[in-house]
Each structure stands twice: as C-alpha cells, then as structure tokens.
Image (tube, grey):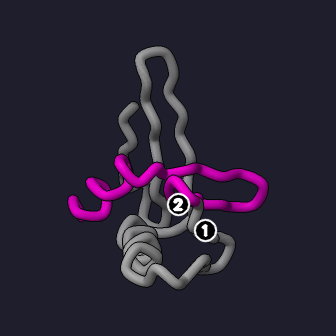
Amino acid sequence: MTISLTTAGDTDCRLTEKTNSTSNAFTVPLSKGTLIAMLTELLSQPEKRMSGDGPVRCDRLRDGLRVSVGNGAFVLPYPQLFPLVVEA
C-alpha cells in the first residue's frame, strides 16, 4: 500500500491510497501545507486527541490518524504517515 499527498488546486489537497488492485482518492478542502501542519501538531503532542480547521478534523487512533471531512474519512496508518510529514 502506498499513500501520497498531492495538491489539488489552490485550496485543496488529495490523499491517495494505491494497492495492487485498488486506488482511492480523498479530497481535503485545505492546502497541503495546512493539512501537514495539522498532522504534525497531533504527532508532536501525544496528549492531544483531535485537531480541526473548518470542516476538516484529524483524530488520533491507535494505529494512525484519521482525516475526516463531512461524512467521509481517510485513515493514515503511522508507517505511511511519517514519510508524508517528513517529506513536506
């Protein structure tokens, strides 16, 4: 499984998960830098459970972080999350 974070316009970014058989894309109405800042904030403060910005919410799970927008959500497992944050 590979997860990538790309810019999808001036104010949006897209989380994409690819496996051998499937591909899923999840659009987040935040800039890539803002989303990375939210994820980094949760990772750097272990006592913090949730971070939000407008319609976007990031929650800490046992195995990673969940990015939620409206009724949709995208789970970022820690092994795939750390390279995204370090890359930015």
Q: Which residues are magenta?
A: 62-88
Q: Quadrant of residue 3?
A: top left
Single out the residue that lies furthest toward the top: 21
Q: Position of residue 81 (x, y in %)?
A: 38, 55
Element carrying mark 2: strand
43 to 68, vertically: above or below: below
As shown in the figure, which amino acid type bears the numbered disc 1?
Answer: Asp
User: Dot 1, how many residues are within 10 Å of its Cα: few (below 14), some (14-19), or many (20+)?
Assistant: some
Residue at the left extreme of this rendering = 87
How many residues crowd around disc 2 within 10 Å: few (fewer than 14), some, or many (20 or more)? many
Q: Is 41 part of what is drawn in magenta?
A: no
Quadrant of image for the C terminus:
bottom left
Residue named by callout 1: 59
Closer-to-camera residue (55/49): 49
Q: What whole-number distance in Å separates the C-alpha atoms at marks 2 and 1?
A: 6 Å
Residue under label 2: 65
In percent of width and height, residue 37 lies at 39, 77
Is residue 30 toward the left or the right of residue 83 in the image? right
Q: Is residue 54 left or right of residue 29?
A: right
Relative image position of residue 67 (x, y in whole percent):
58, 60
Question: Is there a contact, CB below 8 Å, between mark 2 and mark 1?
Answer: yes
Residue in view at x 56 percent, y 58 percent: 62
Estimate the x, y position of residue 82 in percent, counting from the top left: 31, 58
Please, what secondary structure does the residue beneath circle 1 have?
strand
- Front-most of residues 54 and 81: 81
Report the amino acid beneath label 2: Leu
